[in-house]
Every structure is written in structure tokens, then in C-alpha cells.
Image (cartoon, rainbow, N blue to C red):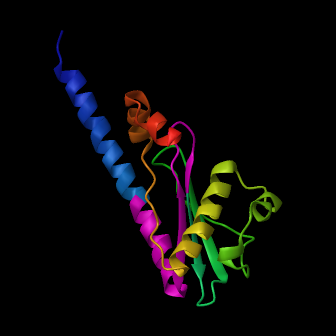
Amino acid sequence: MNLIPLILLFMAAFVLQYLFTFMQMKDFNMHYSTLRKMGRVAIGKVKGALRAGAIVMFAIDDEGIILDGRYLQGLTVLARCKVLKGFEGKDVGQLTEEDCKALRLSRSLTKGVLEASSNYNILMAGGEIPEPEAPLARLGNFLTGKGRRRAAQ
């Protein structure tokens, strides 16, 4: 069996993955820069292992009032940033699940909005935002028993 076509196929897939990731990051950075020009930006991110993840960004003023919002949601590198309407004029630190339900947001977007609110509150209190474990790290901890020991303590 000739492996050259298979190797070329994997190389082409790798290059396409790189290009699409580059395009997605360029789109994200453009929207982040737009929000950053308005003021500070509160960000919430939800990682999805087998379902869509989300990144939510809110431009806020000095009082924590939301000026504009954007989100990125999807399973693949084809996802692009979109405008998030309905939160303008609200205090980012006071957002609740009911605010998200009123706008009929998906579960991952709701978690992203609530994480942005939580991150803002933590930073305003002088704390540090903990970085959640990646899905593969959680799986590895579960398989080695580290997750069960931590939960029992």
C-alpha cells in the first residue's frame, strides 16, 4: 500500500485547519478590538468537548454598564463572532440566568454570559480568575482517580 496519498491528505487537512483557525482568530481579534475601543471588556468562555462552546464579550463603561456585546459559538473553526443584543444598559455584575432566559439564549451562551458576569465580579473584588481544566485534563484526572479524590475531600 502506498502511504504518500494518505500523508498528503493529512498534510492538506492540517494546513486547512491552520488557515481556518487563523481566520477565526482574526475575526475574534477584530471584534475584541472594536469592543476595547468602547472601554473595558468582560469576557466569559465556556469550553465544549462534544457540544458547542461559547465566548461572550461585553464592552462596559467605568460603572460596569454594558455598552455592546458579541459572542462566538460553535463546534468548529468555521464559527464567527456575532452581535449579542438585549444586554445594553444592564450592569454586567448583576446579570442572572433569568436575563438570559428572557432572550432565549442557548445553554452554552447562558453559561458564557454568567461567566463574564462572575469574572467581572471577581476582578472588581481584587481576586484572580481561576482557569478551568481542559476537557482532556478532566478526563485524564477522572481515569486516574484524581477527580474522585478531590471530590471526596
Question: Which residue is more in the foreground, 45 or 3?
Answer: 45
Query: Which quarter of the figure has residue 136?
Result: top left
The magenta stretch spans residue 103: no
Give the residues drawn in magenta, as a range. 25-54
Outermost residue toward the top in this view: 1
Q: Is residue 34 magenta?
A: yes
Would residue 108 be found to the left or right of residue 28 on screen?
Answer: right
Which residue corresponds to the image point at 60% horizontal and 82% vertical from the top-left? 60
- Give the residue drawn at x 53%, y 44%: 48
- On the image, the x and y values in percent for residue 117 come to 62, 69
Residue 50 coordinates in the image, percent (x, y):
53, 36
Residue ranking furthest to the bottom: 62
Instruction: Farthest residue to the front: give it.
Output: 153
141 and 7: which is toward the camera: 141
- Give above or below for 128 relative to 140: below
Horizontal relation, residue 118 to residue 88: left or right: left
Q: Position of residue 115 (x, y in %)?
A: 59, 62
- Locate the N terminus and report the quarter of the image it occupies: top left
**Viewer-proximal residue among 40 and 131:** 131
